[in-house]
Amino acid sequence: MLISRQRTERTTAGTRPFALPALRHPTVSRLLEDHRALLADLLDGLGSPLHVVLPEVFEENVGRLGRAFAGAGADADILFAKKANKADCYVRSAAALGVGVDVASTPELVKALAGGVPGHRIGVSGPEKDDTLHTLAVQHGSLVAIDSLGELRRLAGTARGAGRRARVLLRSRTADRSGSRFGMSRGEREAAVALCAELDRHVELQGFSFHLDGYSAAERALAADEMIDHCVDARRRGASTARLVDIGGGLPVRYVEPRRWEEFLAQNRPEHYHAGKDFKDFYPYGGQTAEQAAHAIMTYPVGGGESLAAKARRHGIRFVVEPGRALLDQAGFTLYRVQQVDDRRETDGYAIVTAEGSSFSLSEQWFNSDYLPDPLLISARPGADELFPACVAGSTCLESDMVTWRKVGFPRPVRRGDLLVYLNTAGYQMDSNESPFHDAALPLKAVLRLDADAAAPRWRLDGI
């Protein structure tokens, strides 16, 4: 009894975890509530960690986002940013829905084509692309975002050699991002427009794009406003086909309830993390939804007070948008098996749970951040309810291999053989940092579909 009271006092004194439950799509809830045995079997058979990917949720997100742009009065072409997840099933879904894919490498372009996306619906971004990527893009009629005068000349040479005409956007630095490593300065942009006219037989200028970090709707809207003006100016100079503005991605995902998120930020301190880890910045887990952000960008007042969408319509401009994380919202989750539990509650006030796998297979890409939503515990055998503070470590020899630095308040003691479920991990968390360190196999992806009239989910391994 005394030991239990000491544990409670120690937890309350400094390490009592703050609950940050993840939002759950109904399909995810149904899988976790009604099909736990299947998930456990998949983990047993395919290994830990295991990524579960849900293309039907991705497809819902595509429809929802398309309606958000249309509702704001904007004409917008959606290109799924493939870099956000390597799973081939999402490319297949994009192809079936008639939306495009944004790629930035030759393998990504090949996968998009193999998944059934026609070349004219593929956008090729990334700085200073190599000649192989240029060649494939030209041969398949993809839209290429050009980053410099030198790249424009190289692409034109590739198109000339192929006897084709390359479709291009000119990526331009915005007025307040003059120091960016991406895109052209004002002088370079003006020279590029002139060069497009000179090389008109080999390149077709279709519009302008830009690069921004972050989720400011105002900043993205103002950057897009600049690009509309560039299109108008280019048409004035003879480029009649300059009618596209690519606004990139930058549409957020809401992982947790906004009120809960604000409360988390207010109480957050280094002692809430293993080893007093002090994170300086977090992804906005409780911010706007992608649909709200799309509406805010398109309705943002630009010159004269008219909305961005209205100005675009007036000038005959169509938008291109490249969401990655936003289309993957709730479209996948990650399972880990618990390998060991080091119960340090008597000395440190919390336990260290070692998962079978590493943090390379689940990591937040937001500038050295922690993936914050609470993982769910699926116990291998019944146990009494008891607050069990613990962080989650990977099973490698690296001190920094922490799947969850934050001390999570599990509802009962975690034991070897239990399962941890990390929700909503499809958008960048699954494979941006994956590594075969220690000769470990890369995690597999199981594609699940839970159709409304199906008694049980259908599953297969991902792969084209």
Image: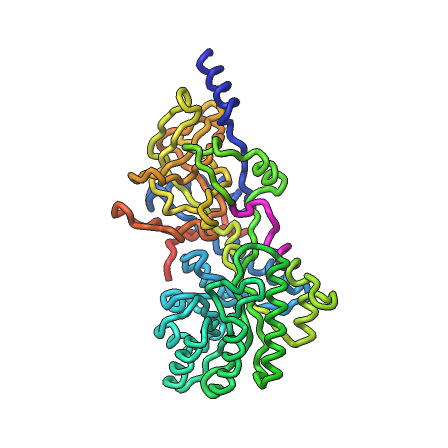
Which region is colored magenta? Answer: 282-295
Is 20 in front, or is 9?
A: 9
Q: Is residue 169 above or below residue 426?
A: below
* Residue 300 percent coordinates (x, y): 68, 61
User: Residue pushed farthest left?
Assistant: 439
- Whether residue 316 sits left or right of residue 384 in the image: it is right
Q: How many marks?
A: 0
Q: Residue at x 37, y 62 (%)?
A: 464
- Whether residue 236 sits left or right of residue 113 in the image: it is right
* Residue 457 seen: no
Q: Is residue 283 magenta?
A: yes
* Residue 224 seen: yes
User: Residue pushed farthest top?
Assistant: 2
* Residue 451 percent coordinates (x, y): 51, 52
* Residue 1 percent coordinates (x, y): 46, 11
Is 140 in front, or is 319?
A: 319
- Whether residue 19 sits left or right of residue 37 in the image: it is right
Q: Residue at x 52, y 49 (%)?
A: 330
Q: Is residue 90 above or below residue 398?
A: below
- Whether residue 322 sits left or right of residue 45 in the image: it is right
Q: Is residue 247 magenta?
A: no
* Residue 200 percent coordinates (x, y): 49, 86
Q: Residue at x 39, y 21 (%)?
A: 347
